[in-house]
Image (spheres, helix red, strand yellow):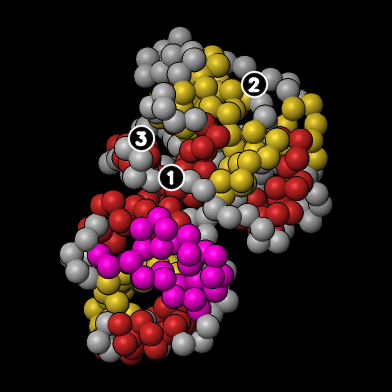
Amino acid sequence: MKAVQVVGYHDKLQLTDIPDPEITGPLDVIVKIGGAGVCRTDLHILEGQWAEKSQVTLPYTIGHENAGWVHAVGDAVTNVAVGDTVILHPLITCGLCRACRDGDDVHCENSDFPGIDTDGGYAEYLKTTARSVVRINDSLQPSDVAALADAGLTAYHAAAKVARMTRPGDTCVVIGAGGLGHIGIQVLDAISGVTIVVVDRNPAAVELAVEVGAHHGIVADGTHVQQILEMTGGHGAEAVLDFVGEGGATAEGIAMLRRAGNYFVVGYGENIDVPTIDVISTEINFIGNLVGSYNDLTELMTLAAQGKVALHTTKYALDDYQQAIDDLDAGRVRGRAILIP
């Protein structure tokens, strides 16, 4: 089969032919890929940022946001059948450790992460397990929802925390309305009662944010922190959901935060520098957000089937993987880029 692989860090990806994956265990599932999301994490992988953490052996197939159709199953698989349309939870989990038993499978002690530390979905087929496949409504096309498997799932995981920790009428500032942000905005609009205020440097991204559910959109032009404070009577927002996490976004986000407010960190790239006396005197909280759980993904796909969450995508043939990577790196992608074998 064709597969796009990392052959070296700081090198370009390569399209090559590798053997098709095979069923070797009773719970194995092989999926024919219908769409694979191109994520900024993929750029970080090529830059070597994940090399020490993942310890993956090169070459390997990249791609951690995947959806498609079940191609083959092990003899103990009962939750899906050949031909079913599925989206893949990004982790392959054991089901036996303490975290899995507690329903917190994203922190599985024995997980594999296709596209990060094992072969992923920039390919024609991907091998996973029954625990990782979510059967989706037949009205949904894999190429339309693939990026919900990680970007959407991460956004949902964080937005659901905001919904649980706020009240109707509270203000949530969303920093960044790009690939993750435009999903998080839709989730907040669907499941919470907060007033959604979006801040982004890109006027087109702000326009998209308002189209998909934000109540207010502000272009980051140097006055945006003051605008947020004025909008909230000088108090700041009860929640800040930061999908950027670099370029000074965290300092600005903290300045927008109300006393006893919650700062939800999704984007990363810089350090949070806050005097500890400010943390205790205002009793603000910093909350990290990794990818969501299997149950989070099933809930997200329910919203997708109801038409309450939709991805804005730019689609590329698998052979055009380098163009997709270049477009993402240059900021030319509106929403999410999707590779289609």
Give the Cα distance between marks 2 and 3: 30 Å
Query: From which residue to which does the magenta span run?
Result: 194-220
In the image, residue 92 above or below residue 256: above
Q: Residues within 10 Å of mark 1 (few under 14, many from 20)?
A: some
Q: Position of residue 307 (x, y in %)?
A: 35, 40
Amino acid type at circle 3 is: Ala
Amino acid type at circle 1 is: Ala
Give whichever of discs 2 and 3 has the lower sequence position: 2
Q: Residues within 10 Å of mark 3 (few under 14, many from 20)?
A: some
Q: How many marks?
A: 3
Residue at figure coordinates x 52%, y 43% from the top left: 147
Residue at figure coordinates x 56%, y 70% from the top left: 202
Q: Position of residue 270 (x, y in %)?
A: 55, 74
Q: Which residue is mark 2?
A: 21
Q: Which residue is mark 3?
A: 305
Answer with the quarter of the image where residue 225 lies. bottom left
- Could you say whether the residue bearing mark 1 is in a helix, strand or loop? loop
Contact flag, marks 2 and 1 (Cβ < 8 Å): no
Q: Is residue 209 in the magenta section? A: yes
Of 23 and 315, nearer the camera is 315
Answer with the quarter of the image where residue 6 lies. top right
Q: Which residue is mark 1?
A: 310
Q: Which label sits in the foreground, 2 or 3? A: 3
Image side of residue 311 versus residue 24, left or right: left
Can residue 326 be seen here? The reply is yes
Image side of residue 94 versus residue 61, left or right: left
The disc at residue 326 is none
Of 326 and 332, nearer the camera is 332
- Could you say whether the residue bearing mark 2 is in a helix, strand or loop? loop
